[in-house]
Image (spheres, rainbow, N blue to C red):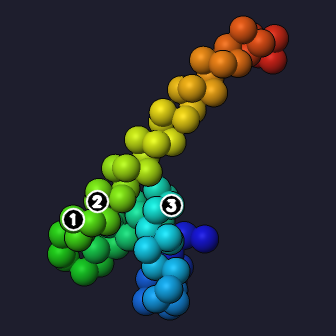
Amino acid sequence: MVPIFYPFSVVPARYREVYQLNPVAALVLAARNILLDGIPPPTPLLLKLAGSSTLALVAGFVVFRLLRRRFYDYL
């Protein structure tokens, strides 16, 4: 669930930290801060966005390296 059509304030407080680990949700929250509120995104949100995006990139690279021999069979 990404906060595009609803504000982040409707997310329960106990789930907000985990919710911000979703790279798409963090990106949308940062964009909403910039475009709608006119304020810079908080530094912890940007760090979570960078960390989770880097983790997804590394995981994708590792999976591709493990499966690349069979990858061409599906193209």
Q: Position of residue 64 (x, y in %)?
A: 62, 22
Q: Residue at x 72, y 8 (%)?
A: 69
User: Which quarter of the rendered picture does the C terminus lie within?
Assistant: top right
Q: Residue at x 46, y 89 (%)?
A: 13
What separation in Å lies between label 1 and label 2 (alpha carbons)?
5 Å
Q: SS class of the residue under badge 1? A: helix
Query: Identity of the amino acid at label 3?
Result: Asn
- Any part of residue 20 in sight: yes
Q: Position of residue 10 (x, y in %)?
A: 50, 91
Callout 2: 10 Å neighbours few (<14), some, many (20+)?
some
Callout 1: 10 Å neighbours few (<14), some, many (20+)?
few
What separation in Å lies between label 1 and label 3 (alpha carbons)?
16 Å
What separation in Å lies between label 3 and label 2 (alpha carbons)?
12 Å
Q: Which residue is mark 2?
A: 46
- Residue 22 is labelled as 3
Label pair 1/2, CB-CB below 8 angstroms: yes
Q: SS class of the residue under badge 2? A: helix
- Residue 43 is labelled as 1
- Residue 11 is labelled as none
Q: Is residue 39 left or right of residue 10?
A: left
User: Which quarter of the rendered picture does the N terminus lie within?
Assistant: bottom right
Q: SS class of the residue under badge 3? A: loop
Identify the image quadrant of residue 71. top right
Label pair 1/3, CB-CB below 8 angstroms: no
Query: Identity of the amino acid at label 1?
Result: Thr
